[in-house]
Image: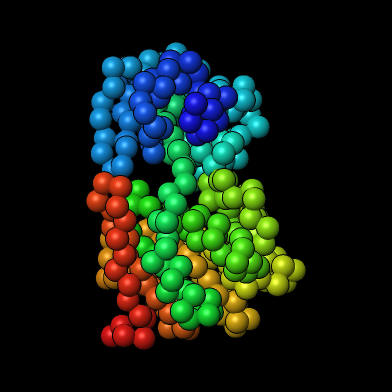
Amino acid sequence: MDPTLQKLQKILPSPLFFLLSEHSEPPEELRMRVGHPVILKQWGRCALTHLVCTEDLMKETLSCCTNRSFYSHSDTILEGYISLPGGVRAGICGKAVCKEGKILSVKDISFLSLRIPRPVPGAADPLLNLLRSTGFRKGMLMYSPPGMGKTTVLRELARKLSSPPYLLSTALLDQRGELSAGLENCPSLSVYLYYPKEKALSMALRTAAPDLIILDEIGKEECAGLAECGKGGVAVIASAHAAGHGELLARPGIAALLQTGMFDYLVGIERTGTKLSFEITETSNLC
């Protein structure tokens, strides 16, 4: 049995597991909406299945994802997701119960999107070669719309850079338990699992003496902490959601980071089927 499928067997209710077992390899995403067929996404393509998501199936899936303890995952549920073993992440939505603009609870969950990580050997090789040519001292910011492979590439870079022959001291900031999936055997990797990213940044700089820091999906909360990385001479490899340069540079926090020289390269990622391609721009060439 596929190793990823083995992990999913412990997480999913039987109808969903049997559905995935019908395919030669696990999908990258599974989507469920009550009253509609389950959708599988494989290499960027989505397809309806014969399995309809009933209210009972949604409840059983949520029960499995929370290990029969909805309350123990209440903090992340309020943020719209559930972290699962093996780097699997369930995004959820339903009806929010709010008071004075604050979400107190979420009920009647009607949609669930299960993102399933898997290794893609060689996916990051062009970027690894670029970093190696610069002595691993250059920062890199990847961007693309969601689902193009940013997390996959970051994970593969972390695997290679923290293992022989490089053995760089690599701090991996994994707030949602997704980025570090499958990296248990990397000897020079320190994983800050479930830490808020801004806290993990500060701790890594003060205590781990990293050669580089890798993190996913940076936002305005992380920008101030990342500026401190630049002052300390620590290279950063990160990602952000954006369709292009213009959208990326329109974000004040990221634009400010670029002005500090934090990132030497911007890397746009595109995917066609199973193939990833990179558009690399030196930030010194930006107007």
Name above or below for residue 113 compared with residue 213.
Answer: above
Q: Quadrant of residue 158?
A: bottom right
Q: Residue furthest front?
A: 165
Camera-side residue of 203 and 120: 120
Q: Residue furthest right?
A: 207
Name above or below for residue 116 compared with residue 52.
Answer: below
Q: Residue at x 41, y 68 (%)?
A: 127
Left or right? Give the position of 141 relative to 65: left
Please, which colouring scheme is shown?
A: rainbow
Camera-side residue of 165 and 93: 165
Q: Residue at x 50, y 68 (%)?
A: 237
Q: Residue 2: percent from the left, percent from the top?
A: 48, 31
Number of on-image labels? 0
Camera-side residue of 228 and 157: 157
Q: Quadrant of residue 110?
A: top left
Q: Residue 163: percent from the left, percent from the top?
A: 61, 61
Name above or below for residue 165 compared with residue 133.
Answer: above
Q: Quadrant of residue 239?
A: bottom left
Q: Residue 80: percent from the left, percent from the top?
A: 48, 40
Name above or below for residue 229 compared with residue 121.
Answer: below
Residue 59 in sight:
no
Camera-side residue of 19 and 120: 120
Q: Residue at x 35, y 26 (%)?
A: 23
Q: Residue at x 48, y 65 (%)?
A: 238
Q: Residue 257: percent from the left, percent from the top?
A: 46, 77
Residue 4 in sight:
yes
Q: Give the quadrant of the C terminus.
A: bottom left
